Amino acid sequence: MLTVSGLKRLHIFVSFDLQDGECVALQGPSGVGKTLLLRSIADLDPNEGTVRLDGTLREAMPAPAWRKRVTYLAAEPGWWSDTVQEHFTAWGDALPLVARLGLPDDCGAWSIQRLSTGERLRLGLARALMLRSRVLLLDEPTSALDPAAAAAVEGVIAERISDGASVLWSTHDDAQARRVGSRILAMRPDGSIEESLP
Amino acid sequence: MTYIQLSYGNLVLPALLVVMDGVFSLVLRLKLERQLAIATVRMVVQLVLVGYVLTFLFAAVSPLWTALAALIMVLFASREIVARQKRRLQGVWKYGLGTGCTLLAAGTVTMFALLTELRPDPWYHPRYALPLLGMMLGNTMTGISLGLDVLTNSLVRERAAVEACLALGGTRHEALLPLIRDALRSGFMPIMNSMAAIGLVSLPGMMTGQILAGVEPVDAVKYQLLIMFLIAGGTGLGTLAAVLGGARLLTDHRHRLRLDRIEASG
């Protein structure tokens, strides 16, 4: 279970829990701080407050170990090498997942430059999912995808949730929020969150 | 050793060449005449002053005065490093990093040369220590400022890539390594280029100076080789320290990228 209490970053001040095997949708207008919140939980920006995974404080482990358990996926994932497969520690193992997300087997050798926005999103997701993290912090993972690809992504993530992963899923799509979230956290401009059921 | 001494009178005719440049600027409306005049006056004043300061220092041979002169040179070098940065660090590190690295690099190789091979008496004799330090500063400064500039610019440009690596559990070292390599390569490049071109394309100023002063060319070459080896070593040390230091300052103990530590530009 992920416990966030008194997390403070700029105007944001929130507390909430995320159970194992639970997906919570994070909503709110653009610029309200959804990305800031997700980044703060992953400890990618300086922030205050206590965040625990199964009772263990994140400060009790090195930041890289924390992020392998509590993984943030950016809305526009970054790439540090030239080809797709160089970004995976074990490209062969990632192939079934990549195929399920609707990408061909030979895309490992593709240059990052030629990827479309949607391809980048799905490959970024596949790269993050390979860590088998306990908690996924997804920043609009389907915003640039066509309905079929979005459905594939939702399917893959639903599987992870049923395997016990927790997901905090930021989305602008109300229908998607109700579909994937067992609860909805709505962020308000004052930096607080309001919880509701779909 | 004999050399042709110049009087100030001998400089009048050559100085007319600068006046010629000024005439070009006026005729072609380049609007450079003011800048040219200021630059020329600055050069004359600075060099004449340095001449007298060095005369004083060489007569005094005092460790204290020599150290003071060296310190002032290092401070000017670090100011120059900061001036060449498009993006600067915040707070004390803005000057601290450059000063520390030039001092480390130029200081180490200068001392190394003075204590092992040149061995003037006393070892801190300003006639050897200061020109040597000056040449080291000028060159290590180039490597350090280039390396830092490439590092900070590429961190800003490649932010998404670096943070993707960090978000996936990469350490700050893993995430920054490709950029650190690029920055080091850029910092090392000028000295390697000048080593490759030296003697064919360019005759280095110090060697030319020694030859004009009557030193045998082969002896002047030995001096120049010593200087080049020292510069290469100093640039390597300084650039490495500056780039690794910069990478450390722009990340933190929780392996976060801290671009907020770069001064807002403008």
Image (spheres, coloured by chain):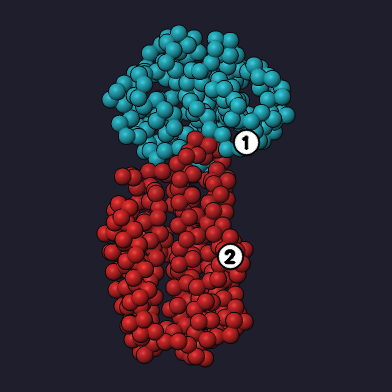
Q: Quadrant of the C terminus of chain B?
A: top left
- Residue drawn at x 58%, y 10% is A148
Label 2, secondary structure: give it: loop
- Residue drawn at x 31%, y 61% is B23
Report x, y in % for residue A135.
53, 27
Q: List the residue tagged with mark 1.
A: A82
Q: Nearer the viewer, residue B137 or B261?
A: B137
Label number found at residue B193: none
Disc 1 sits on a residue from what chain?
A: A
Can the viewer see residue A137?
Answer: no
Q: List the residue tagged with mark 2.
A: B201
From the viewer's perspective, tell me whether residue B219 is left or right of residue B63: right
Kind of residue at badge 2: Val
From the viewer's perspective, tell me whether residue A146 is left or right of residue B101: right
- Residue drawn at x 48%, y 70% is B136
Q: Which colour represents chain B?
A: red
Vertical relation: A31 (above or below) B243: above
Vertical relation: B25 (above or below) A72: below
* C-alpha span from label 2 to label 1: 37 Å
From the viewer's perspective, tell me whether residue B83 is left or right of residue B159: left
Label 1, secondary structure: give it: loop
Disc 2 sits on a residue from what chain?
A: B
Q: Which colour represents chain A?
A: cyan
Vertical relation: B184 (above or below) A82: below
Report x, y in % for residue A72.
50, 30
Q: Nearer the viewer, residue B41 or A6?
A: B41
Kind of residue at badge 1: Asp
